[in-house]
Image (tube, rainbow, N blue to C red):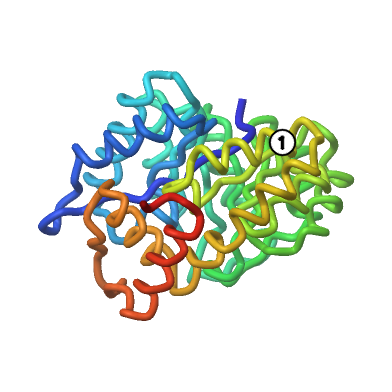
Amino acid sequence: MFTGSITALITPFRNGKVDEDAFAKLIERQIAEGTNGLVPCGTTGESPTLSHDEHRRVTEICIEVAKKRVPVIAGCGSNSTDEAIGLMEHAQKAGADAALIVTPYYNKPTQEGLYQHFKALHDAVPLPIIIYNIPGRSVVDMTVDTMARLNNDLPRIIGVKDATGDVARATRQRRACGPDFLMLSGEDITALGFNAHGGRGCISVTSNVAPKLCAEFQAATLKGDFAKALQLQDKLAVLHDAMFVETSPGPVKYAASLLGLCAPDMRLPMAPVSERTREVVKSTLHAVGLLG
């Protein structure tokens, strides 16, 4: 159910508010161009600067527009366990198919703290949970042993979005957690190698602007057609690099604005991207054939 190209959706803003119309159109474009799943309110969606009401509304819009055509994995993470439970409760009532839960940032919990956090969420809300392991942003790194312990003890801990950038982790996690444990890459540029190690998809930033290419790439890897996947990887690689030439989601939001999908607006402390970044993003969109 949760495989292939899954988009970590941007949250469009206009005049300081969530642009609901642009968000709905963005979702329709994703589904029309072959995206296999949607993640609202993740890192790319600027969830840390959404109010609680906005967070819930963005999740609701995504579920309403998707209409079960593709699964919705709602971002529900927080560094407060009680707050994460509240977001999960809302997501479940709204009709989400799963919850994406980031390892608690800033608090810097121990491995036991991570285990107890995810156990509390699992026991509180009957929604499948995908662990979001992104030590570059959250500072803490969930070990393979802790992941295996969660997977073995708690049936609704179903997988991981791995944003460590370490392709070898996929093999270690698969061996420790078993073949049914869902592994999704959280880094576009390493998704090819990650899938070769047993991954089954990517929660992608780039697919915000190139959903069709990303879906074709993921489909090729999942069919075992790595020759075709490598061709698509070479085409997408410059785009992946451009989306991270500055802190995400700055570049991808600017790219989306060039494609007429939404305004490039972000919220402080995210500042507008530099002129150099704008030049890189624009030239890359031209080179890949997304911008005429």
| Residue 266 makes an appearance in the image | yes
Give the image quarter of residue 241: bottom right
Q: Residue visible at 31% across and 79% down?
A: 275
Tell me residue 130's x, y (percent): 60, 41
Q: Is residue 83 above or below residue 223?
A: below
Amino acid of disc 1: Ala
Q: Residue visible at 51% across and 33% down?
A: 35
Q: Residue visible at 67% across and 63% down?
A: 164
Number of numbered discs on residues: 1
Q: Is residue 281 left or right of residue 16?
A: right
Q: Is residue 29 left or right of residue 115?
A: left
Please identify the residue farthest to the left as the structure is shown: 15
Please identify the residue farthest to the right as the structure is shown: 175
Q: Residues within 10 Å of mark 1 (few under 14, many from 20)?
A: some
Q: Nearer the viewer, residue 30 or 56?
A: 30
Give the image quarter of residue 28: top left
Which residue does the numbered mark 1 point to in the structure image? 220
Image quarter (top left, top right, bottom left or bottom right) of the N terminus: top right
| Residue 187 makes an appearance in the image | no
Tell me residue 143's x, y (percent): 75, 60
Give the image quarter of residue 252: bottom left
Q: Is residue 124 left or right of residue 264?
A: right
Secondary element under disc 1, as helix, strand or loop, is helix
Tell me residue 194's x, y (percent): 75, 51
Please identify the residue farthest to the top as the structure is shown: 68
Q: Nearer the viewer, residue 4 or 174?
A: 4
Tell me residue 12's x, y (percent): 26, 50
Q: Residue visible at 53% across and 54% down?
A: 102
